[in-house]
Image (tube, grey):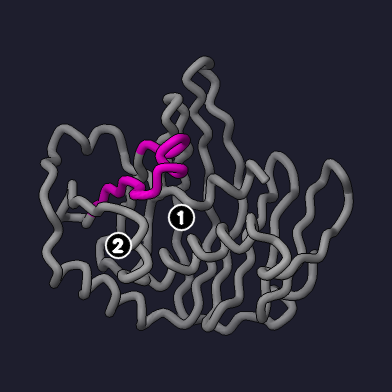
Amino acid sequence: MRYIIAILCIALPLMAWAKQSTMEPSKQLLVDLQLKAKQIQSISSPFTQEKHLEMFDEVLVSKGHFVFQKPANLRWEYVEPFRAGFLLSDGTGKEWDEVSNKERDFTLESSPAMSMVVSQIMAWTTFDLEWLESRYTIQQIGTTPVILKLRPRNDAAKEFLAYLTVTFAADSLTIDLLELHETDGDFTRISFDNPSINDLIADETFTTVR
């Protein structure tokens, strides 16, 4: 399940930190982000993931594709350097990986781990403000573009997650970068490239492993 944990983060270019100051985001800003998210019926986007390990200089790079369609259809798939991922439709789904060469069925009720992952993805994709504020303290560290920094409220989450950052696109409609900083110094960065918004998505995208 380690490959899925990377989904929960949002990244930030390092050179931007020097120009940022921490502030409390206005309620209006957060509401505006939520209203923007409500315009989205579907998203399809390639992504690049970088895993930075504190003990090694080498950066582990993976590429994949993310698809979302309201109300709750998801597909998260790695295609390089290995194939792995999961899809979900109406509360049931499949996960797969190239190593085992197997597909595994799951439901959100029977798989707490997958339920947690899906909840996180859904919360960010729809910018579920109530859900996010109940689980994180939120600070603003950038205005153009909007960048948020979140720290977990839950003590168990604090044991492995130091904070995460979220960088929005210039129009604040989608997320450009995700980053998760772990307490041991490792961090994962995901960048979304040229997302397609509100295009028609084939039904089999959320039911068939291709």
Q: Residue 192, which numbered label?
A: 1
Q: Which residue is mark 2?
A: 133
Residue at 56% across, 64% down: 118
Q: Is residue 5 above or below residue 29?
A: above
Of 188 and 92, nearer the camera is 92
Disc 2 crowd rating (10 Å Cα; few below 14, some 14-19, many 20+) is few
Where in the figure is residue 110, as x and y percent of width and height? 73, 66
Where in the figure is residue 98, as x and y percent of width and height? 82, 46
In the picture, measured across the screen, residue 63 lies left or right of residue 210, that is left
- Where residue 96 sits, quadrant-wise, is bottom right
What amino acid is labelled 1 in the image? Phe
What amino acid is labelled 2 in the image? Glu
The residue mark sitting in front, 2 or 1, is 2
In the picture, measured across the screen, residue 176 lies left or right of residue 51, that is left
In the picture, measured across the screen, residue 29 lies left or right of residue 98, that is left
Where in the figure is residue 186, as x and y percent of width and height? 47, 28
Residue at 56% across, 58% down: 117
Separation (CA) of disc 2 from disc 1: 24 Å
Which numbered disc flags the more N-terminal residue, 2 or 1?
2
Instruction: Name, please, the residue furthest toward the right.
Output: 101
Instruction: Name, please, the residue furthest toward the front.
Output: 155
- Where residue 106 sits, quadrant-wise, is bottom right
Disc 1 crowd rating (10 Å Cα; few below 14, some 14-19, many 20+) is many
Residue at 48% across, 51% down: 8
- Where residue 161 sits, quadrant-wise, is top left
Q: Residue 68, which numbered label?
A: none
Q: Is residue 189 above or below residue 67?
A: above
Q: Is residue 72 above or below residue 193?
A: below
Quarter of the figure that contains the C terminus: bottom right
Q: Which residues are magenta?
A: 147-162
